[in-house]
Image (cartoon, helix red, strand yellow):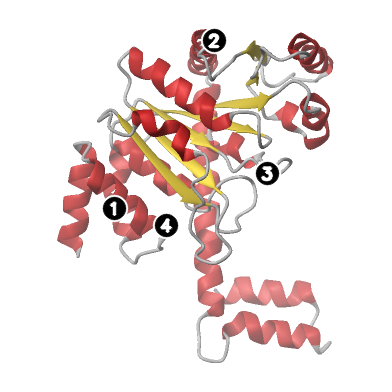
Amino acid sequence: MARDVATLVAGAHEGRTRDIARLISMIEDGAPEVPAIMRDLAATSGHAQVIGITGSPGVGKSTTTAALISGLRARGERVGVLAVDPSSPFSGGALLGDRIRMQEHATDAGVFIRSMASRGHLGGLSATTPQALRVLDAAAFDTVLIETVGVGQSEVEVAAAADTTLVLLAPGMGDSIQAAKAGILEIGDVFVVNKADREGADSTVRELRNMIALGDHPDRGWQPRVVKTVASTGEGVDALISTIDEHRAWLAESGEGEQRRLRRARDEVEALAVAILHRRWEAGTDGGVLEKAAREVAAGRLDPHAAAEALVDGS
Protein backbone atom coordinates (compact mmCIF):
# COMPACT_ATOMS: atom_id res chain seq x y z
CA MET A 1 0.00 0.00 0.00
CA ALA A 2 2.98 2.33 0.61
CA ARG A 3 3.73 2.17 -3.11
CA ASP A 4 0.10 2.95 -3.91
CA VAL A 5 0.24 6.06 -1.70
CA ALA A 6 3.44 7.20 -3.38
CA THR A 7 1.82 6.72 -6.78
CA LEU A 8 -1.30 8.64 -5.78
CA VAL A 9 0.73 11.50 -4.31
CA ALA A 10 2.86 11.69 -7.46
CA GLY A 11 -0.32 11.77 -9.52
CA ALA A 12 -1.72 14.58 -7.37
CA HIS A 13 1.45 16.59 -7.87
CA GLU A 14 0.95 16.17 -11.61
CA GLY A 15 -2.68 17.31 -11.30
CA ARG A 16 -4.32 13.97 -12.13
CA THR A 17 -7.96 14.35 -11.09
CA ARG A 18 -8.55 10.69 -10.28
CA ASP A 19 -5.55 10.53 -7.93
CA ILE A 20 -6.57 13.77 -6.19
CA ALA A 21 -10.09 12.41 -5.68
CA ARG A 22 -8.77 9.07 -4.38
CA LEU A 23 -6.54 10.78 -1.82
CA ILE A 24 -9.40 12.93 -0.53
CA SER A 25 -11.65 9.86 -0.28
CA MET A 26 -9.01 8.07 1.79
CA ILE A 27 -8.77 11.10 4.07
CA GLU A 28 -12.55 11.30 4.50
CA ASP A 29 -12.72 7.58 5.27
CA GLY A 30 -9.93 7.81 7.84
CA ALA A 31 -7.81 5.22 6.01
CA PRO A 32 -4.70 3.96 7.85
CA GLU A 33 -2.57 5.41 5.03
CA VAL A 34 -3.54 9.00 5.90
CA PRO A 35 -0.39 9.72 7.99
CA ALA A 36 1.78 8.53 5.09
CA ILE A 37 -0.20 10.72 2.69
CA MET A 38 0.23 13.79 4.90
CA ARG A 39 3.95 13.07 5.26
CA ASP A 40 4.44 12.85 1.49
CA LEU A 41 2.42 16.01 0.86
CA ALA A 42 4.04 18.16 3.56
CA ALA A 43 6.92 19.53 1.51
CA THR A 44 4.75 20.74 -1.36
CA SER A 45 1.86 22.44 0.45
CA GLY A 46 1.39 26.01 1.62
CA HIS A 47 1.30 27.88 -1.69
CA ALA A 48 -2.36 28.10 -2.71
CA GLN A 49 -4.50 31.09 -1.80
CA VAL A 50 -7.42 29.81 0.27
CA ILE A 51 -10.70 31.69 0.04
CA GLY A 52 -13.52 30.84 2.42
CA ILE A 53 -17.11 31.50 1.31
CA THR A 54 -19.81 31.52 3.96
CA GLY A 55 -23.27 32.90 4.62
CA SER A 56 -26.83 31.91 5.38
CA PRO A 57 -28.78 29.53 3.13
CA GLY A 58 -30.24 31.19 0.06
CA VAL A 59 -27.71 34.00 -0.34
CA GLY A 60 -26.14 32.40 -3.43
CA LYS A 61 -22.93 30.81 -2.17
CA SER A 62 -22.77 28.14 -4.88
CA THR A 63 -23.65 30.63 -7.61
CA THR A 64 -20.97 33.01 -6.34
CA THR A 65 -18.46 30.17 -6.17
CA ALA A 66 -19.20 29.27 -9.80
CA ALA A 67 -18.83 32.93 -10.83
CA LEU A 68 -15.49 33.19 -9.02
CA ILE A 69 -14.27 30.04 -10.76
CA SER A 70 -15.09 31.63 -14.12
CA GLY A 71 -13.30 34.85 -13.21
CA LEU A 72 -10.20 33.13 -11.88
CA ARG A 73 -10.02 30.73 -14.83
CA ALA A 74 -10.27 33.69 -17.23
CA ARG A 75 -6.90 34.86 -15.97
CA GLY A 76 -5.35 31.41 -16.14
CA GLU A 77 -5.52 30.23 -12.54
CA ARG A 78 -6.08 26.59 -11.62
CA VAL A 79 -8.93 26.42 -9.12
CA GLY A 80 -9.83 23.79 -6.54
CA VAL A 81 -13.17 23.79 -4.71
CA LEU A 82 -14.09 22.07 -1.46
CA ALA A 83 -17.86 22.42 -1.08
CA VAL A 84 -18.98 21.21 2.33
CA ASP A 85 -22.55 19.91 2.33
CA PRO A 86 -24.88 18.79 5.11
CA SER A 87 -24.71 15.06 5.68
CA SER A 88 -27.41 12.59 4.81
CA PRO A 89 -28.79 11.22 8.10
CA PHE A 90 -28.86 7.76 6.50
CA SER A 91 -25.59 7.38 4.58
CA GLY A 92 -23.47 10.08 6.21
CA GLY A 93 -22.59 11.28 2.71
CA ALA A 94 -22.89 14.75 1.23
CA LEU A 95 -26.21 16.02 -0.08
CA LEU A 96 -25.25 17.50 -3.44
CA GLY A 97 -28.16 19.90 -3.86
CA ASP A 98 -26.28 23.02 -4.96
CA ARG A 99 -23.42 21.41 -6.88
CA ILE A 100 -25.46 21.47 -10.10
CA ARG A 101 -24.73 25.20 -10.33
CA MET A 102 -21.03 24.39 -10.87
CA GLN A 103 -21.54 21.80 -13.59
CA GLU A 104 -20.40 24.21 -16.29
CA HIS A 105 -16.87 23.74 -14.91
CA ALA A 106 -17.06 19.96 -14.55
CA THR A 107 -15.17 19.24 -17.78
CA ASP A 108 -12.52 21.94 -17.24
CA ALA A 109 -9.17 20.26 -16.52
CA GLY A 110 -8.09 23.37 -14.61
CA VAL A 111 -10.91 23.01 -12.08
CA PHE A 112 -11.41 20.37 -9.39
CA ILE A 113 -14.67 20.35 -7.44
CA ARG A 114 -15.24 18.08 -4.46
CA SER A 115 -18.30 17.90 -2.22
CA MET A 116 -17.48 16.86 1.33
CA ALA A 117 -19.97 15.75 3.98
CA SER A 118 -19.98 17.71 7.23
CA ARG A 119 -20.84 14.44 9.04
CA GLY A 120 -22.22 16.31 12.00
CA HIS A 121 -19.12 18.47 12.45
CA LEU A 122 -20.13 21.94 13.63
CA GLY A 123 -18.60 25.19 12.39
CA GLY A 124 -19.68 24.87 8.76
CA LEU A 125 -16.78 22.65 7.65
CA SER A 126 -15.94 18.96 7.59
CA ALA A 127 -13.48 17.64 10.18
CA THR A 128 -11.25 16.48 7.30
CA THR A 129 -11.30 19.78 5.41
CA PRO A 130 -7.76 20.82 6.49
CA GLN A 131 -6.24 17.57 5.18
CA ALA A 132 -8.24 17.75 1.93
CA LEU A 133 -7.00 21.31 1.56
CA ARG A 134 -3.42 20.04 1.78
CA VAL A 135 -4.09 17.66 -1.13
CA LEU A 136 -5.34 20.48 -3.38
CA ASP A 137 -2.49 22.72 -2.26
CA ALA A 138 0.07 20.06 -3.14
CA ALA A 139 -1.67 19.53 -6.49
CA ALA A 140 -0.55 23.06 -7.46
CA PHE A 141 -3.92 24.76 -7.54
CA ASP A 142 -3.42 28.52 -7.47
CA THR A 143 -6.63 29.17 -5.53
CA VAL A 144 -8.76 26.90 -3.37
CA LEU A 145 -12.34 27.94 -2.63
CA ILE A 146 -13.95 26.50 0.51
CA GLU A 147 -17.73 26.81 0.52
CA THR A 148 -19.34 26.13 3.88
CA VAL A 149 -22.53 24.29 4.76
CA GLY A 150 -24.48 27.51 5.26
CA VAL A 151 -26.34 26.75 8.44
CA GLY A 152 -26.46 30.26 9.84
CA GLN A 153 -24.58 31.04 13.04
CA SER A 154 -22.00 28.23 13.17
CA GLU A 155 -19.89 29.34 10.23
CA VAL A 156 -17.01 31.02 12.01
CA GLU A 157 -14.65 28.04 11.64
CA VAL A 158 -14.07 28.88 7.98
CA ALA A 159 -12.11 31.98 9.02
CA ALA A 160 -9.48 29.77 10.64
CA ALA A 161 -9.10 27.72 7.45
CA ALA A 162 -8.92 30.57 4.93
CA ASP A 163 -6.54 33.35 3.96
CA THR A 164 -9.47 35.51 2.89
CA THR A 165 -13.02 35.03 4.19
CA LEU A 166 -15.98 36.18 2.12
CA VAL A 167 -19.27 36.60 3.97
CA LEU A 168 -22.28 36.60 1.66
CA LEU A 169 -25.50 38.40 2.49
CA ALA A 170 -28.61 39.23 0.51
CA PRO A 171 -31.11 42.11 0.67
CA GLY A 172 -34.42 41.49 2.36
CA MET A 173 -33.27 38.53 4.44
CA GLY A 174 -32.30 40.42 7.60
CA ASP A 175 -28.75 39.19 7.05
CA SER A 176 -27.03 42.33 8.26
CA ILE A 177 -28.73 41.98 11.66
CA GLN A 178 -27.97 38.25 11.75
CA ALA A 179 -24.33 39.03 10.92
CA ALA A 180 -24.05 41.23 13.97
CA LYS A 181 -25.76 38.62 16.20
CA ALA A 182 -23.66 35.73 14.95
CA GLY A 183 -20.30 37.47 15.28
CA ILE A 184 -19.79 37.24 11.52
CA LEU A 185 -18.55 40.83 11.44
CA GLU A 186 -15.43 39.68 13.28
CA ILE A 187 -14.51 37.02 10.72
CA GLY A 188 -15.30 38.65 7.38
CA ASP A 189 -12.51 40.19 5.31
CA VAL A 190 -14.89 40.98 2.45
CA PHE A 191 -18.67 41.27 2.74
CA VAL A 192 -20.55 40.46 -0.44
CA VAL A 193 -24.08 41.76 -0.85
CA ASN A 194 -25.25 39.32 -3.49
CA LYS A 195 -28.50 39.54 -5.46
CA ALA A 196 -27.83 43.28 -5.49
CA ASP A 197 -30.46 43.79 -8.21
CA ARG A 198 -33.10 43.33 -5.50
CA GLU A 199 -34.73 46.17 -3.66
CA GLY A 200 -32.91 47.10 -0.46
CA ALA A 201 -29.38 46.27 -1.65
CA ASP A 202 -28.05 49.81 -1.10
CA SER A 203 -29.63 49.88 2.35
CA THR A 204 -27.94 46.58 3.24
CA VAL A 205 -24.58 47.96 2.08
CA ARG A 206 -25.02 51.09 4.21
CA GLU A 207 -25.96 49.06 7.28
CA LEU A 208 -22.92 46.85 6.87
CA ARG A 209 -20.54 49.74 6.38
CA ASN A 210 -21.93 51.49 9.45
CA MET A 211 -21.52 48.35 11.58
CA ILE A 212 -17.99 47.80 10.27
CA ALA A 213 -17.09 51.43 11.03
CA LEU A 214 -18.36 50.99 14.59
CA GLY A 215 -16.38 47.78 15.00
CA ASP A 216 -13.01 47.58 16.68
CA HIS A 217 -10.19 46.35 14.44
CA PRO A 218 -7.06 47.59 16.24
CA ASP A 219 -4.96 44.51 15.67
CA ARG A 220 -6.16 43.68 12.18
CA GLY A 221 -5.07 46.68 10.15
CA TRP A 222 -7.56 45.74 7.46
CA GLN A 223 -10.89 47.48 7.19
CA PRO A 224 -13.36 44.92 5.77
CA ARG A 225 -14.70 45.85 2.36
CA VAL A 226 -18.29 45.65 1.13
CA VAL A 227 -18.91 44.63 -2.50
CA LYS A 228 -22.19 44.32 -4.40
CA THR A 229 -22.67 41.43 -6.85
CA VAL A 230 -25.29 39.69 -8.93
CA ALA A 231 -23.51 36.36 -9.18
CA SER A 232 -26.12 34.82 -11.48
CA THR A 233 -25.21 37.33 -14.22
CA GLY A 234 -21.57 37.92 -13.25
CA GLU A 235 -22.19 41.55 -12.34
CA GLY A 236 -19.69 42.80 -9.77
CA VAL A 237 -17.59 39.61 -9.81
CA ASP A 238 -14.55 41.36 -11.33
CA ALA A 239 -14.72 43.97 -8.57
CA LEU A 240 -14.96 41.16 -6.01
CA ILE A 241 -11.87 39.44 -7.40
CA SER A 242 -9.99 42.77 -7.37
CA THR A 243 -10.92 43.21 -3.70
CA ILE A 244 -9.69 39.69 -2.95
CA ASP A 245 -6.42 40.57 -4.70
CA GLU A 246 -6.18 43.73 -2.59
CA HIS A 247 -6.59 41.68 0.58
CA ARG A 248 -4.03 39.14 -0.60
CA ALA A 249 -1.50 41.95 -1.16
CA TRP A 250 -2.20 43.30 2.33
CA LEU A 251 -1.69 39.82 3.83
CA ALA A 252 1.74 39.61 2.19
CA GLU A 253 2.84 43.14 3.06
CA SER A 254 1.65 43.10 6.67
CA GLY A 255 2.86 39.60 7.51
CA GLU A 256 -0.68 38.65 8.55
CA GLY A 257 -0.78 35.99 5.83
CA GLU A 258 2.07 34.09 7.44
CA GLN A 259 0.44 34.45 10.85
CA ARG A 260 -2.83 33.05 9.54
CA ARG A 261 -1.08 30.03 8.04
CA LEU A 262 0.74 29.48 11.33
CA ARG A 263 -2.54 29.58 13.24
CA ARG A 264 -4.09 27.22 10.69
CA ALA A 265 -1.26 24.72 11.16
CA ARG A 266 -1.51 25.00 14.95
CA ASP A 267 -5.27 24.37 14.88
CA GLU A 268 -4.78 21.39 12.57
CA VAL A 269 -2.11 19.84 14.79
CA GLU A 270 -4.23 20.39 17.90
CA ALA A 271 -7.33 18.82 16.31
CA LEU A 272 -5.37 15.78 15.16
CA ALA A 273 -3.74 15.38 18.58
CA VAL A 274 -7.13 15.43 20.29
CA ALA A 275 -8.47 12.89 17.79
CA ILE A 276 -5.52 10.57 18.42
CA LEU A 277 -5.98 10.82 22.19
CA HIS A 278 -9.70 10.12 21.87
CA ARG A 279 -9.03 6.98 19.83
CA ARG A 280 -6.57 5.77 22.47
CA TRP A 281 -9.01 6.44 25.30
CA GLU A 282 -11.80 4.53 23.55
CA ALA A 283 -9.61 1.55 22.59
CA GLY A 284 -10.21 -1.74 24.36
CA THR A 285 -12.84 -4.45 24.51
CA ASP A 286 -14.37 -3.04 27.70
CA GLY A 287 -14.96 0.44 26.33
CA GLY A 288 -11.53 1.84 27.09
CA VAL A 289 -10.17 4.13 29.79
CA LEU A 290 -12.60 6.93 28.88
CA GLU A 291 -15.57 4.68 29.60
CA LYS A 292 -14.03 3.56 32.89
CA ALA A 293 -13.40 7.16 33.93
CA ALA A 294 -17.00 8.05 33.03
CA ARG A 295 -18.31 5.25 35.25
CA GLU A 296 -16.21 6.49 38.17
CA VAL A 297 -17.49 10.03 37.75
CA ALA A 298 -21.11 8.92 37.37
CA ALA A 299 -20.83 6.85 40.55
CA GLY A 300 -19.43 9.80 42.49
CA ARG A 301 -16.13 8.06 43.21
CA LEU A 302 -14.11 10.56 41.16
CA ASP A 303 -14.58 14.18 40.16
CA PRO A 304 -14.47 15.17 36.44
CA HIS A 305 -11.31 17.27 36.73
CA ALA A 306 -9.35 14.50 38.39
CA ALA A 307 -10.63 12.02 35.83
CA ALA A 308 -9.61 14.28 32.97
CA GLU A 309 -6.12 14.84 34.40
CA ALA A 310 -5.70 11.10 34.86
CA LEU A 311 -6.66 10.49 31.24
CA VAL A 312 -4.19 13.06 29.95
CA ASP A 313 -1.38 11.90 32.24
CA GLY A 314 -1.99 8.28 31.27
CA SER A 315 -1.92 8.96 27.53
- In which quadrant of the rendered image does the N terminus lie? bottom left
Instruction: Tell me the residue at 34%/67% (across/down).
Output: 32
- At label 1, the amino acid type is Arg
- At label 3, the amino acid type is Val
Residue 34 % position (x, y): 34, 59
Say if 169 sits above or below 149 in the image.
above
From the image, tell me which residue sits under label 3: 151
**Which label sits in the foreground, 3 or 1?**
3
From the image, tell me which residue sits under label 1: 22
From the image, tell me which residue sits under label 2: 235
Instruction: Tell me the residue at 28%/53% (across/down).
Output: 22
From the image, tell me which residue sits under label 4: 28
Image quadrant assignment for residue 191: top right
Residue 58 % position (x, y): 66, 33
For marks 3 and 1, the one nearer the N-term is 1
For marks 2 and 1, the one nearer the N-term is 1
Within 10 Å of disc 1 (Cα), the crowding (few <14, some 14-19, many 20+) is some
Within 10 Å of disc 2 (Cα), the crowding (few <14, some 14-19, many 20+) is some
